[in-house]
Amino acid sequence: PELRSLKLQHSKVDVRHLTTESDIRILCVARKLGMLTSLRELNLGSSRLSGNLRQILCDLQAPLESLELAFCSLVPADLAFL
């Protein structure tokens, strides 16, 4: 819970083609991120997040100081969430 910085680059979960299994993985990652109450820096670069950024980040307990989303194929809904 004291982790302040985390890199989860190159995720293999393709949210553009969700299955029940990948949806469960996304929810699991979101819950685990929510348990990191000291997290301030998150790098999700090159992950396939398109349209699911809210679902992945919704359980965060505190605002991030840094969020890297390079090459994540974000869509307008993701940007609206940010």
Image: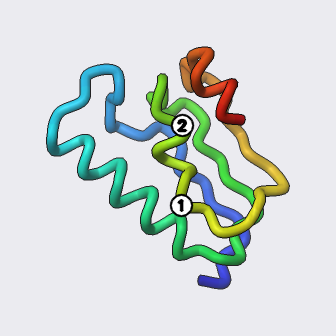
Q: Residue at x 54, y 40 (%)?
A: 54
As measured in the structure, the alpha-carbon distance from the residue carrying label 1 to the one carrying label 2 is 11 Å
The percent coordinates of residue 67 (x first, y second) are 73, 45
Q: Quadrant of the C terminus?
A: top right
The residue beneath circle 2 is 53
Element on which disc 1 rests:
loop
Element on which disc 2 rests:
helix
The residue beneath circle 1 is 59
Is residue 38 rendered to the left or right of residue 9? right
Kind of residue sitting beneath label 2 = Leu
Is residue 18 rendered to the left or right of residue 59? left
Kind of residue sitting beneath label 1 = Asp
Residue 64 vertical position relative to residue 53 in the rendered view, above or below: below
Q: Residue at x 35, y 29 (%)?
A: 15
The percent coordinates of residue 50 (x first, y second) are 48, 23
The percent coordinates of residue 58 (x first, y second) are 55, 52
Image quarter for residue 45? Answer: top right
